Structures are given as structure tokens and as C-alpha cells.
């Protein structure tokens, strides 16, 4: 789906390193693998403000925090976004959970995902059960 979503966008690259690893696959594993390939890369990890409260529960969080710059995407739904990390404020109220729930309940996801992604979700019959 990511490849379909970024098709034609030359500034984006889909990296499937997580798919090639046996489960479980953790974010720290991805960061370490990218660092191994490119030790001098500046890595930014975008996370929705709705997930910031669980961030410190991530596997080997302290190490990950040293290796990447977390950036918070404030979608405008949370009154208090912690300012520990840089915040990108966009009035875009789209979340993966909402998209999965919309599909499960038969509601439209048009304009929330690229058309190619919507077609994959429908064709593969993904997200038939509620995400919450």
C-alpha cells in the first residue's frame, strides 16, 4: 500500500526491511538497520500526538531516542501535546485507526487515502474488523 501511495513521488522511498525480518519486528530494529546502511543519516521519526503517551513503552526507547529525532504530528484532536519533541501542527484529522474503523463499518475512506490504496484495501478485503 505504501508503494501505491507514493507512486510518482520521487522524494519518497518505500523500505521493506521490516517485512524481510522475522517477527516480532520492533522500531529500534528498523532504526539500527538504517543506521548500519547509512551511519550519518539524520533520522526523523514521525508519530501522531495520539500515540505520544505510550512512546516510552517502546522496546529500547532510550536507545531509539538517541538515534532518531522524534517529531510529533499534532492532528488538532488533543488539547495538550507534550512539547518534548518538535511538533508539526496540521489540521488533518486522519488516523490509521479511524480508516480501519471506517472500512470495518462500511463507511467511505475516499479522500482519506490515495485511490490506489483504497483499491488495495477493498480488493484484499482488509480491515473488516474494528481497530478499537
Image: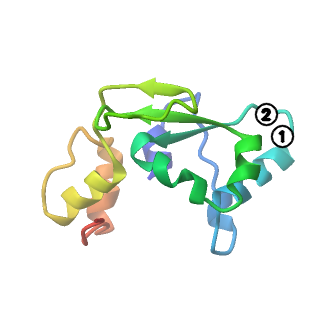
Q: Nearer the viewer, residue 17 or 42?
A: 42
Report helix, strand or loop for mark 2: loop
Residue at position x 68%, y 58% in the image: 17
Residue 96 got which mark?
A: none
| Residue 45 percent across, percent down from the top left | 60, 40
Q: Position of residue 107 (x, y in %)?
A: 13, 55
Quarter of image, res 18: bottom right
Quadrant of the frame with the C terminus: bottom left
Q: Residues within 10 Å of mark 1 (few under 14, many from 20)?
A: few
Q: Is residue 56 left or right of residue 123?
A: right
Camera-side residue: 72 or 15? 72
In the rendered image, which residue does mark 2 sit on? 41
Q: Are marks 1 and 2 in contact (CB under 8 Å)?
A: yes
Residue ID at (21%, 48%) = 109
Q: Position of residue 10 (x, y in %)?
A: 57, 29
Is residue 127 or residue 64 the one in the foreground?
64
**Circle count:** 2
Residue where numbered disc 1 is placed: 38
Q: Residues within 10 Å of mark 2 (few under 14, many from 20)?
A: few
Vertical comparison of 53 with 81: above or below:
below
Q: Is residue 7 shown left or right of residue 103?
A: right
Task: Give the quadrant of residue 94.
Answer: top left
- Element marked by disc 1: loop
Marks 1 and 2 sit apart, C-alpha to C-alpha, by 6 Å
| Residue pictured at 74% horizontal, 31% vertical | 42
Amino acid at each position: 500500500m505504501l508503494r501505491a501511495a507514493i507512486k510518482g513521488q520521487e522524494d519518497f522511498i518505500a523500505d521493506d526491511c521490516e517485512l524481510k525480518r522475522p517477527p516480532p519486528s520492533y522500531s529500534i530494529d528498523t532504526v539500527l538497520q538504517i543506521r548500519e546502511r547509512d551511519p550519518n543519516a539524520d533520522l526523523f521519526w514521525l508519530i501522531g500526538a495520539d500515540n505520544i503517551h505510550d512512546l516510552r513503552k517502546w522496546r529500547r526507547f532510550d536507545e531509539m531516542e538517541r538515534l532518531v529525532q522524534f517529531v510529533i504530528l499534532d492532528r488538532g484532536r488533543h488539547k495538550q501535546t507534550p512539547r518534548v519533541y518538535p511538533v508539526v501542527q496540521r489540521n488533518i484529522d486522519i488516523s490509521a485507526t479511524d480508516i480501519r474503523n471506517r472500512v470495518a463499518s462500511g463507511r467511505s475512506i475516499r479522500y482519506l487515502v490515495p485511490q490506489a490504496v483504497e483499491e488495495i484495501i477493498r480488493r484484499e478485503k482488509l480491515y473488516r474488523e474494528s481497530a478499537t
